[in-house]
Amino acid sequence: MDQSKIDALRARPVAAFDHLIDGRHVAASDGGRMEIISPIDGTVLTTVAAGTPADMEAAIASARAAFDDGRWAGQPPAARKKVLLKWADLIEVNALELAVLGVRDNGTEISMALKAEPLSAAATIRYYAEALDKIYGEIAPTPGNILGMIYKEPVGVVGAIIPWNFPLMIGAWKLGPALAVGNSVVLKPAETASLSLMRMADLALEAGLPPGVLNAVTGKGHVVGETLGLSMDVDVLVFTGSGMTGRRLMEYSARSNLKRVYLELGGKSPNIVFADAPDLDEAAKVTAAGIFRNAGQVCVAGSRLLVEDAIHDDFVAAVVKVSEAMRVGDPLRIDTQIGAVNSEAQLQANLAFVDTATREGGRVVMGGSRVLQDTGGYYMAPTIVTGVTRDATLAQKEVFGPVLGVTSFATEEEAISLANSTVFGLAGAAWTSNLSRAHHMVKSVRTGVMHINTYGGADGTVPLGGVGQSGNGSDKSLHAIEKYVNLKTAWIKL
Ligand code: ADP
């Protein structure tokens, strides 16, 4: 990465963004616009169209027409593959530009964003492009006078509501499989992270995706997101975001056409460190990165550190030491390890969690406050709170910020019981040299992904999905495709 290239890109003014509907850029039907504030310094970066319900209806109608006339679903798999591969190439060619635009919008440190955003999105699109002509139907084991066939058909119109922490990566997790199997998609980016995703959508058209197959509408969740959720013409809704919005989407489905709803929600993921961990220094380093990168705004963040009594004080000291060395600040500097918090509101919510934790008996051993306020941006010191009890707010509620709660345990059974004591089940980790214990932890911790002797970094070959109130359905891997197809049976009497 080259700092001077990044600086040149950040100096560019950002043009205003309109919706992408039916292959054209269109303004909101009432002309409304929304200011985009950069979390780096609190200044207005640009504006986007403030979508109206009518805008969203137009996008859905365009997607429906594109699906029904087969301009994409009807193309031979090899042709769809070619377009998606080209799109992945274009994302890669424009990776730095996309990453810098995204960082100016959402505040993720560039050292993480370049890889985690455009480069990850390109890899995901490529993965599903390569997979799409390797998906077969089935012939059922029927009696000889019957032919039972099982087709995998695209569902039709997919609504995808995307969060602000990793818009390109998570956007691609939905777009890749949905488009690969022939669906049309209506995208709804998050209010505070629309820009890079809108730009990535443009690149799809440049790659040859027919107009109308991918439409994108910016605006407020409770306006255009609600219209998408309540639409009678959307077949599947996929979402990553908060539990509260996830619940709403299920209600929208129930109140409209019973569309399938797949949710990837939050977590309160336990990172469990046993005294027999193979390398406690490595564990401390990865623990700090696992909660503090992207200022903790990561759904799988290891936000609960569970440490065995015998090593508690030493291990916490080691995590504090590593965390103190992490540079918080301007996310467009390549040596920054913890960028900006996404918005003022999010920062205030994070600080309120620290207050509550203190009131409930926790001890702030590091951080706890806002920093770099003179920049005009939204920054928070990495924060570590010890003495967090099983039922404390900090042990039970997702912060989605750079706040690590620490709880000690005496036995493996206690660690498992603490790990499973929330309504969530997204990610987790155990650090141990004992092979049997490692497998026992994988089996016993109720979660979508369990890491052993590492945290994070799982690539696109494995699914990511939550259990409990962390959601349903999976992103990534071939399993994600199941969300975007219907199984159709042909029962043929010979
Ligand atoms: P957060 O609280 O972290 O911003 P949200 O779940 O509110 O997370 O946001 C994730 C996505 O959901 C965003 O794209 C947002 O616009 C969208 N959203 C928010 N509220 C609604 C809603 N009522 N209906 C549909 N989408 C919504």
Image (tube, rainbow, N blue to C red):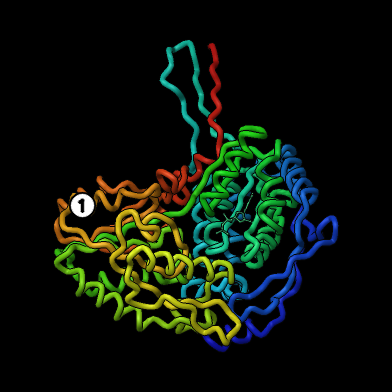
**Residue kind at label 1, given as amino acid type:** Glu
Determine the image quadrant of residue 201: bottom right
164 relative to 256 in the view: left or right: left
Q: Nearer the viewer, residue 347 or 121?
A: 347
Q: Nearer the viewer, residue 431 or 147?
A: 431
SS category of the residue bearing label 1 = helix
Tell me the residue at 56%/40% (across/down): 261
Q: Compared with residue 93, is residue 150 higher up or lower down, i.e. above or below?
A: above
Q: Nearer the viewer, residue 324 or 488?
A: 324
Q: Compared with residue 39, is residue 58 higher up or lower down, i.e. above or below?
A: above
291 relative to 166 in the view: left or right: left
Quadrant hosting ligand 1 = bottom right
485 relative to 411 in the view: left or right: right
Q: Position of residue 405 (x, y in %)?
A: 34, 65
Q: Compared with residue 28, is residue 259 higher up or lower down, i.e. above or below?
A: above
Tell me the residue at 18%/65% (across/down): 277
Report whether residue 74 is seen: no
Q: Residues within 10 Å of mark 1 (few under 14, many from 20)?
A: some
